Image (spheres, rainbow, N blue to C red):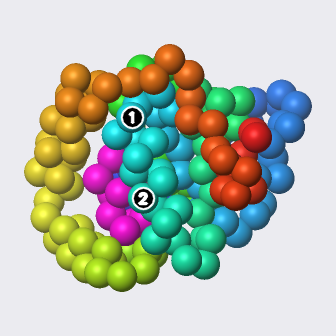
Amino acid sequence: MSSLKDTKAFGENKTGEEEPYKGILEESSPIILFDGVCNFCSSIVLFTIKRDKNSVFKFAPLQSNAGRYLLKRFNLPTENHNSFVLVEQNRFFIKSTAVLRVAKRLGGIWPLLYVFMLVPKPIRDFIYDIVAKNRYRWFGRKEECLVPTPDIKNRFLDF
């Protein structure tokens, strides 16, 4: 198991069930799981795609089949979607750590945000949790998950 508290090595959860999405973990692309009905979260995904010049990241709503599969594989809750999740190299990262690891790989000045990893995780996640708790009130929510346009559809799992 990884020494990071918010990561877990893939393969620790052997469910024995058919794994229709097994191949997505064998790909080298990091996968961002996001709340697909959250306006703020969907905006962050579109922001990330625009700045991900090398198309490094793949995406899946937490509510999608692929999202639920990955959450189960890492023993994460499949309901009450209050976290941004990054799946990278058979490990998962959540909350502020996930956000900062994504920023580190974007173009422009965004990798500079990675310096906030020096801030203790409880402080970073406290701020993250405030935004997560209020995201629907501040930014609204959709009735259905984000549906990607044809030009970015290949970046999403389950579409």
Residue 61 percent coordinates (x, y): 57, 37
* Residue toward you, 22 or 102: 102
* Residue toward you, 71 or 4: 71
Q: Is residue 50 above or below residue 67?
A: below
The quarter of the image holding the C terminus is top right
Is residue 23 rendered magenta in the image? no
Q: Is residue 33 visible?
A: yes
Is residue 101 rendered magenta in the image? yes
User: Which label number is shown at residue 90?
Assistant: none
Residue type at mark 1 is: Asn
Q: In the drawing, does residue 69 fall left or right of residue 9?
A: right
The residues bearing labels 1 and 2 have C-alpha atoms spaced at a distance of 12 Å
- Mark 1 or 2, nearer chain start: 1
Residue 116 percent coordinates (x, y): 19, 68
* Residue toward you, 155 or 72: 155
> Mostly what secondary structure, the magenta segment?
helix
Residue position for label 2: 47
Residue position for label 1: 39
Q: In the drawing, does residue 122 fall left or right of residue 136?
A: left
Instruction: Write down the quadrant of residue 20 in the picture.
Output: top right
SS under mark 1? helix
How many numbered dots are placed on residues in this image? 2
Q: Mark 1, residues whose alpha carbon is within 10 Å: few (<14), some, or many (≥20)?
A: some
Q: Is residue 73 above or below residue 11?
A: above
Chain part drawn in magenta: 94-103
Looking at the image, which residue is at 55% across and 77% down? 53
Residue 87 percent coordinates (x, y): 56, 54
Residue type at mark 2 is: Phe
Q: Is residue 49 above or below residue 106?
A: above
Looking at the image, which residue is at 73% across and 51% down? 150
